[in-house]
Amino acid sequence: MAGSTARDPVGRALDLLTWLAENGTDGPLGVREIARGMGTSPTTVHRLLQAFEERSLVRRDDQGSYYGGLELVRLGRLASRFSVQAAGRPVLEKLAADVDETSMLGLLDPRRGELMLVDCVQTSHPLRYVVELHTWRPLWAGAAGLGVLAFLEDGERARLLREHPPQPVTEHTLPTAEAVEEFCARARGQGYVLTRGQRTPGAVGVAAPIRDADGRVVGDVCLTVPDNRFRESDEQRYATALTSAADDASAILAAAGYRLATATLDLGARARP
């Protein structure tokens, strides 16, 4: 089980909650099914599920399988009273309408050193990319990640590159930490990033950072455009609309007093089609 050991019962419990949240949406799950999925023993899973059941974090049906419990729902609602996703939705809708390309909202988890896309608004064009939401992405590949990484404090960016060195995703992925640093320096000079095929072949990505009430980078607003529809003359139009959208999103977070240091990653609401 990732991130836990036999001497870390709290870690094992958190790993189980995470696994259930990621895999328990299609129906009830049995103890052995969960244990296989996590790579741990059924005895350990059963013991933890009993503790969760006592606290209403899970509930058990007549066949002995488990669902998420009402207390888990309650805690999730409390943790997401201010939803960055909901607050940012009008910004994405306006951006997508202004440029008629798919707009996305990414949020950073600085501890993991990764980013998650939590919402998107699709273009009206029939040719579009399917955006994979609620999965972790590296910061060093593609516009969504680099739109955050480029604008972090120098020490934090260096630490993240040291702990998470670049790996090849496509032939256009930046190959080394030094190449990433050079790219980020250029991006800071223009206030946004633009990438071509670094994470998805044939895709152009453009992204600009959003900041919390303390001015700290917490995520970004992004556009994704098929390469065969992108024209060099479009870059400035996209960049202007995108940086304006990022400023609007940052202003919303500042007005709400949202701070990354006290926030939980916003996973509550799913994106609307």
Image (tube, rainbow, N blue to C red):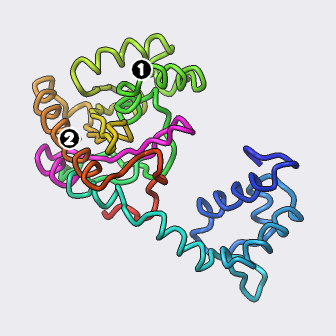
Badge 1 element: loop
* Left/right of residue 196 with respect to residue 149 in the rendered view: left
The residue wearing badge 1 is: 172
* Amino acid type indicated by mark 1: His
Residue 84: quadrant of the picture: bottom left
Residue wearing tag 2:
247
Foreground residue among 10 and 28: 10
Q: Is residue 21 above or below residue 205?
A: below
Task: Kindly indicate the quadrant of the structure image that contains residue 230.
Answer: top left
The extreme bottom residue here reads: 62
Magenta highlight range: 92-116
Q: How far across and down, in percent of the image, does residue 142 sit?
A: 39, 30
Which secondary structure lies at badge 2? helix
Q: Residue at x 14, y 39 (%)?
A: 241
Name which residue lies at 17% across and 31% down: 239
Q: Tell me: 14 left or right of 155.
A: right
Please state which of residues 131 and 125 is positioned toward the viewer in this rendering. Answer: 131
Q: Where is residue 225 in the image (x, y as percent from the top left)?
A: 25, 37
- Vertical placement of 194 versus 269: above or below? above
The mark nearer the N terminus, 2 or 1, is 1
